[in-house]
Amino acid sequence: MENEQFQEAIAQTVREVLETMTFIEVMPETPYLESAFRLENEWSALLPFFGADSGSLLLNCSSSFAKTATGALLGLEENEVAEGQAMDTVRELANMMAGGVFFRLDSEKSSVQLGIPRFFRREEVADLPISVAGVLICPFVFRSLSPEGEQEERVFIEFGRDTKV
Amino acid sequence: MRFLIVDDSVNIRTFIRKVLNMTGLPVEEILEAGNGQQGIEVLEKEKVDVVLTDINMPVMDGLEMIRLVKAQPRFSELKMIIVSTEGSREKILEAVKMGAAGYLKKPFGPEQVLNLLTETMQNGE
């Protein structure tokens, strides 16, 4: 899971999904391994996958990123975006990213089945019914506008493999 | 043309609705459903020309909905198109066997939708 082909599939998929659906341009930074999911931002969507490979994909982003993405997706101004809509966007982006990564790795067979993505806030992480044997953290940086000017923000795509019992 | 969008994501249904209205196709009405079971209930009551459906949904998935609908002769002209994050050749063949007329892999924009719908409607003539 940690090899170069996998990392390249993640980078290409994330850029394609975000640019096509939300017009947000992101740049991949160097991936790294950690022992657990890293929840730098306050919102996440967790999507399990199983089959030839099993584990979970986690999309971690700020609520403001989610609202920006939702506004672009639905053709709304950011202040018109409801929290529920933004949460739905996080789940659906995780869904498209997971599907896209595994499609790039094998476009012939569906060797991996995707589960239903679940949204959660960082403070709810203790309730997550998963444990992983190692997580590949893939940061993506983008520039956002705020009242203070242009800021650099990150979203994280994190792939965790299930622990072996 | 009357469309039915079947997806458990409200945002995706809204996005597809927006995209359909951008294609330039003659859109008469766009109906929505949150899963395959609801999709069948809509089809029982409303005239629909094209269904755009996700696969992975709770209650009833898109492939099962297609299988049940296409088993009924009165829906023989109905075009059912899969719109999904999964796009492997194996999955596409499975969908076609069930009766799907086309397959659109997420993410997509208006051009991909227009091309697929044009091709699908031409194949039916």
Image (cartoon, helix red, strand yellow):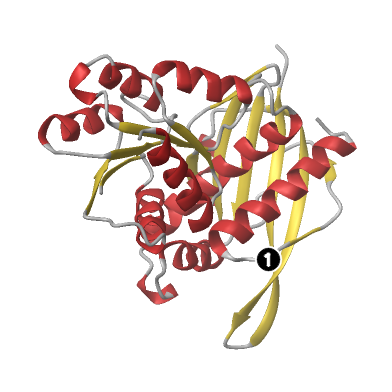
Left or right side of B90 for A117: left
Q: Position of residue B100 (x, y in %)?
A: 41, 26
Q: Is residue B84 visible?
A: yes
Q: Nearer the viewer, residue A89 or A128?
A: A89
Measuring 25% from the left and 27% from the top, which residue is drawn there?
B37
Name the image quarter holding the N terminus of chain A.
top right
> Relative to A84, does residue B36 appear above or below in the rendering?
above
Q: Position of residue A163 (x, y in %)?
A: 71, 20
Pick out the residue farthest to the bottom: A148
Pick out the residue farthest to the left: B45
Q: Which residue is mark 1?
A: A25
- Number of marks in the rendered image: 1
Q: Nearer the viewer, residue B104 or A78?
A: B104
Left or right side of A72 for B14: left
Q: Is residue B109 visible?
A: no
> Relative to B57, does residue A146 appear above or below in the rendering?
below
Q: Position of residue A55 (x, y in %)?
A: 66, 26
Q: Nearer the viewer, residue B8 or B18?
A: B18
Location of residue B117 (image quadrant): top left
Location of residue A22 (image quadrant): bottom right
Measuring 54% from the left and 25% from the top, which residue is drawn there?
B92
> Relative to B1, does residue A127 appear above or below in the rendering?
above
